[in-house]
Amino acid sequence: MKFSFLVENKTDNPGIMAEHGLSIYIETSEKRILFDGGATNLLVNNCEAMGIDLGNVDLAVVSHGHYDHTGGFPAFHRINPSAPIYIHRNALRVSYGTEGGALEKGGTLDKEPCSIAWSDEELKELSQQLYFTDGPVIVTENIRITGTVPAGDDFTPTENFYVMEQGKPIIDDMSHEQCLVIREPEGLYIFSGCSHRGVINALNAGKAMFPGERVAVLVAGMHLYSAAEEDRSRVIDEILRENMDRVMPVHCTGIDAICQLKSAMGSRCTVATAGDVFTF
């Protein structure tokens, strides 16, 4: 197993740029996978600097329908117009974040949507590559996509995202969030883009793809930057109980949660940046 961070919020690698987004190139003995596409076509520039050919990608997985995970796919299409892109059937809905909290508590919708920003022409070009998911997808015996991460009351941070229905905003249930799970001899590798339904729910959804098998590595945006201290600590305690070989908190996790994980796990917690490459 080898994976390379094409896009991440930060970088300390010369010649590599960073942006608010996430994209990972994953190589297994069976498939070469693009997990998410960052916010822009930056992944193409970083791939050139890293010597990675996106034309070799066998399939792509979209974690959820937000711009910072999907902006690079039109550029990816121009390089690789045939690899299937697995995206949830609800991911194309127009959605908004808020300023000042939930609308029900006086917040206001952002002026610009946070959803996928493909133009009509780009969507048309991509349409032949899009494979819409809902439930679990078995790509190979060892590679699976969860489909919708089941919602749960525990460990789910408060979110303020809305979709428009008949001109009115309703709470986005984030049913378009899904995870990629890869089974290796040492255990499961679970990739979660933002964990909007809670990173523990994402972790459990990944484990459900291969019942009874241990999780070796979790790579996840955990979206804990706005979580209350009590909730953040509870989530981290649950992660620690899994006793994984490696946890890689990225993108939207938040510095407080990253520091707590690093303090608790030491070298088993890796803070990855754009341009980093890991081999297991």
Image: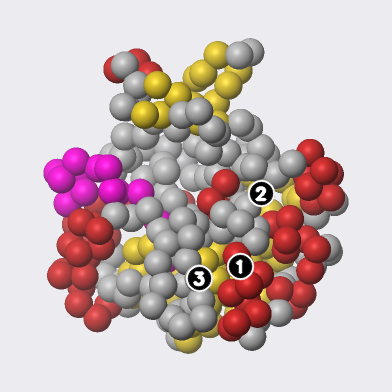
- Give 2 or 104, whichever is nearer the viewer: 104
**Coordinates of residue 242 in the picture (x, y in percent):** 28, 65
Can residue 4 be seen in this snapshot? yes
Between 107 and 29, the residue placed more toward the observer is 107
Q: CA distance from mark 1 to mark 3?
A: 9 Å
Residue 186 shown left or right of residue 163 in the figure: left
Which residue has dot 2 on it? Answer: 87
- Report whether 151 appears left or right of 59: left
Dot 1, how many residues are within 10 Å of its Cα: few (below 14), some (14-19), or many (20+)? many
Which residue type carries mark 2?
Ile
Q: Which residues are drawn in magenta?
A: 214-234
Kindly identify which numbered label has been placed on residue 17: 3
CB under 8 Å between callouts 1 and 3?
no
- Left or right: 209 in relation to 27: left
Foreground: 3 or 255? 255
Amino acid at dot 3: Met
Q: Nearer the viewer, mark 2 or mark 1?
A: 1
Question: Mark 1 highlights which residue?
Answer: 43
As displayed, is residue 129 above or below residue 100?
A: below
Q: CA distance from mark 3 to mark 2?
A: 26 Å
